[in-house]
Image (spheres, rainbow, N blue to C red):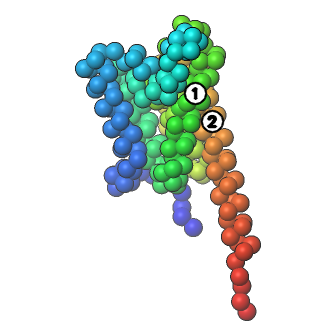
């Protein structure tokens, strides 16, 4: 049985192709919208426009754009760490489902629970979702992941005036993680029950 551990090596990071691709996408979009166009709000979630039926697509695109370099760097670091871990234990399709769904759910609740004047952006809701799934895989005795997670959560919440996306991204990640765990268990039980034994 494979031992689950938070320990990351350089080789683990090199093999985390989907994580590195997502980081590359975030950096590329930052370069285009923050440095060249100098207007990241183009892709951001503007609640008052959504209320008027405009920019509904921004509930998704807002998870791809960041306010400044510090915002980008903190999310890239979280994505690198938690994404590299989650790729060891979840399939790429599961990873993408967790990431995108948690990000969009975070955006939706940010819209529902914040004022019309709120503008939201950042991948942290999606990252909180994958962090939740990492928590479901790491054994309790592996304390480092929990300590790092608490630090990351504290930094994200403390540096942001808007935290509904973080909270509901985390809840969504836990929910998807439990669903994946349930489906995997059902498949394992089914395979076990249909296995033929010869004596």
State left or right for residue 136 relative to residue 24: right
Q: Is residue 109 visible?
A: yes
**Badge 2: residue crowd in 10 Å (few <14, some 14–19, many ≥20):** many
Element under disc 2: helix
Q: Quadrant of the N terminus?
A: bottom right
Residue at (62, 23) in percent of width and height:
109
Residue at (51, 50) in percent of width and height:
93
Asked if the residues shown at circle 2 and circle 1 are in contact, with their CB atoms under 8 angstroms apart, the answer is yes
Residue at the spot of label 2: 172
Q: Is residue 145 visible?
A: no
**x, y percentage for residue 166?**
56, 27
Q: Quadrant of the C terminus?
A: bottom right
The image shows residue 95, relative to residue 184, as above or below, that is above
State left or right for residue 141 relative to residue 95: right
As drawn, the residue found furthest toward the front would be 53
Element under disc 1: helix
The image shows residue 192, relative to residue 8, as above or below, that is below
As drawn, the residue found furthest toward the bottom would be 199
**Badge 1: residue crowd in 10 Å (few <14, some 14–19, many ≥20):** many
**x, y percentage for residue 47?**
54, 13
The image shows residue 120, relative to residue 175, as above or below, that is above
- The Cα–Cα distance between marks 2 and 1, rounded to whole angstroms, is 8 Å
Residue at the spot of label 1: 106
**x, y percentage for residue 56?**
53, 21
The tally of labels here is 2
Quadrant of the rendered image containing residue 164? top right
Q: Which numbered disc flags the more N-terminal residue, 2 or 1?
A: 1
As drawn, the residue found furthest toward the left would be 36
**x, y percentage for residue 2?**
54, 64
């Amino acid at each position: 049985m494979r031992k689950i551990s938070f320990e990351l090596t350089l080789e683990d990071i090199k093999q985390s192709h989907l994580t590195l691709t997502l980081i590359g996408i975030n950096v590329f979009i930052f370069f285009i919208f923050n440095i060249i166009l100098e207007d990241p709000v183009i892709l951001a979630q503007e609640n008052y426009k959504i209320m008027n039926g405009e920019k509904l697509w921004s509930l998704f695109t807002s998870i791809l754009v960041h306010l400044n370099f510090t915002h980008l760097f903190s999310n890239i670091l979280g994505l690198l760490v938690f994404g590299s871990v989650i790729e060891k234990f979840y399939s790429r399709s599961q990873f993408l489902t967790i990431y995108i769904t948690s990000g969009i759910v975070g955006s939706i609740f940010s819209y529902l629970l914040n004022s019309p004047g709120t503008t939201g952006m950042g991948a942290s809701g999606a990252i909180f979702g994958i962090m939740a799934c990492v928590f479901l895989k790491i054994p309790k005795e592996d304390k480092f992941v929990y300590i790092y997670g608490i630090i990351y959560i504290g930094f994200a919440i403390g540096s942001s005036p808007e935290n509904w996306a973080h909270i509901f991204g985390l809840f969504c990640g836990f929910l998807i993680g439990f669903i994946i765990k349930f489906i995997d268990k059902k498949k394992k039980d089914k395979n076990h029950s249909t296995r033929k034994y010869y004596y």
